Image: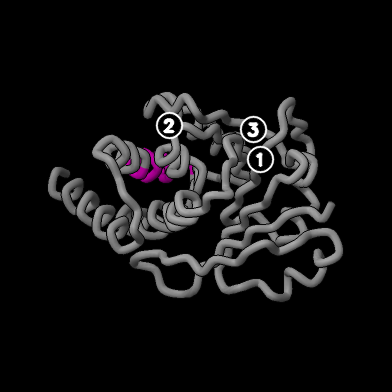
């Protein structure tokens, strides 16, 4: 097992360096602890179709971390309250909460098994900046609204923006993590939603395109 841990650590560090993501020792430990728990619980809770833990590092951890350079380089991005909708097993919310302890992350999912796993991980890793909500998107009425809604594989842009608009503060943004640039998904929302920015993401060890779309409701 030690050899595997060493291998996973090297894989994570290699990918982070390639993506220009700086990791502290504490962040490395928490990210690896998270992926080990993910693999363990995945057998019973079916958190992901990915079964191999090395693939989980590439397709879950590194993919989630691919937005970190945008978060840190974008001086206009001052969001402190972020909700990850359809988070599943905590992607990208848990890795981002580990990277940005000063920001508050709410992880929303309607699947009770997945949110039980998230409660477990939050406790295990001592993530005091994480809140878990086991509800459907349309039923969740937050007492305090969010600066940003992020989603990695939740739905079409129309479903995301229609279903989550009630959670945003005025001037809040949607952060949609997508594969190839979803030109066909932008047309139906053009009247209500403005595309502020499209960022081509670099994801180490992953083939195919990845994009971050920064969207905002029109005032």
Q: Is residue 83 left or right of residue 202?
A: right
Magenta residues, as a range?
A: 35-45
Q: CA distance from mark 1 to mark 2?
A: 24 Å
> Is residue 37 on the magenta stretch?
yes
Give the mark nearer the N terminus: 2 vs 3.
2
Where is residue 187, by image quadrant? Answer: bottom right
Secondary structure under badge 3? strand
Q: Which mark is residue 57?
A: none
Magenta: predominant secondary structure element?
A: helix
Q: Tell me the residue at 62%/40% (across/down).
A: 83
For disc 2, the marked residue is 121
The total number of labels drawn is 3
Determine contact: label 1, label 3, CB under 8 Å: no
Where is residue 104, by image quadrant? Answer: top right
Q: Is residue 68 left or right of residue 149?
A: left
Question: Which is nearer the eye, 102 or 36?
Answer: 102
Q: CA distance from mark 1 to mark 3?
A: 20 Å
Q: Which mark is residue 134?
A: 3
Q: Tell me the residue at 34%/42% (across/down).
A: 31
- Image spot of residue 114 (x, y percent): 54, 38
- Which class describes the residues within 10 Å of circle 2: few (<14), some (14-19), or many (20+)? many
- Which class describes the residues within 10 Å of circle 1: few (<14), some (14-19), or many (20+)? many
| Colour pattern | one colour
Give the quadrant of the N terminus. top left
Question: Which is nearer the eye, 175 or 94?
Answer: 175
- Image spot of residue 147 (x, y percent): 66, 40
Q: Tell me the residue at 40%/25% (across/down).
A: 126
Secondary structure under badge 2? helix
Give the mark nearer the N terminus: 1 vs 3.
3
């Amino acid at each position: 097992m030690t050899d595997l841990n060493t291998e996973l650590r090297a894989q994570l560090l290699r990918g982070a360096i390639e993506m220009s993501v700086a990791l502290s020792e504490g962040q490395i430990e928490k990210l690896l602890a998270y992926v080990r728990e993910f693999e363990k619980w995945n057998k019973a809770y079916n958190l992901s179709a990915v079964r191999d833990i090395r693939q989980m590092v590439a397709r879950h951890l590194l993919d989630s971390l691919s937005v970190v350079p945008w978060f840190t380089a974008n001086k206009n991005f001052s969001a402190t309250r972020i909700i990850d909708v359809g988070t599943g097993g905590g992607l990208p919310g848990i890795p981002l909460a580990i990277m940005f302890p000063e920001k508050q992350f709410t992880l929303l999912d309607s699947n009770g098994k997945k949110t039980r796993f998230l409660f477990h991980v939050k406790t295990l890793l001592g993530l005091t900046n994480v809140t878990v909500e086991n509800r459907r998107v349309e039923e969740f009425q937050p007492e305090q609204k969010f600066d940003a809604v992020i989603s990695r594989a939740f739905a079409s842009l129309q479903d995301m923006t229609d279903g989550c608009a009630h959670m945003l503060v005025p001037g809040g943004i949607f952060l949609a993590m997508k594969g190839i640039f979803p030109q066909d998904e932008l047309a139906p929302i053009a009247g209500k939603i403005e595309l502020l920015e499209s960022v081509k993401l670099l994801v180490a060890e992953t083939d195919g395109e990845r994009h971050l779309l920064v969207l905002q409701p029109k005032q």
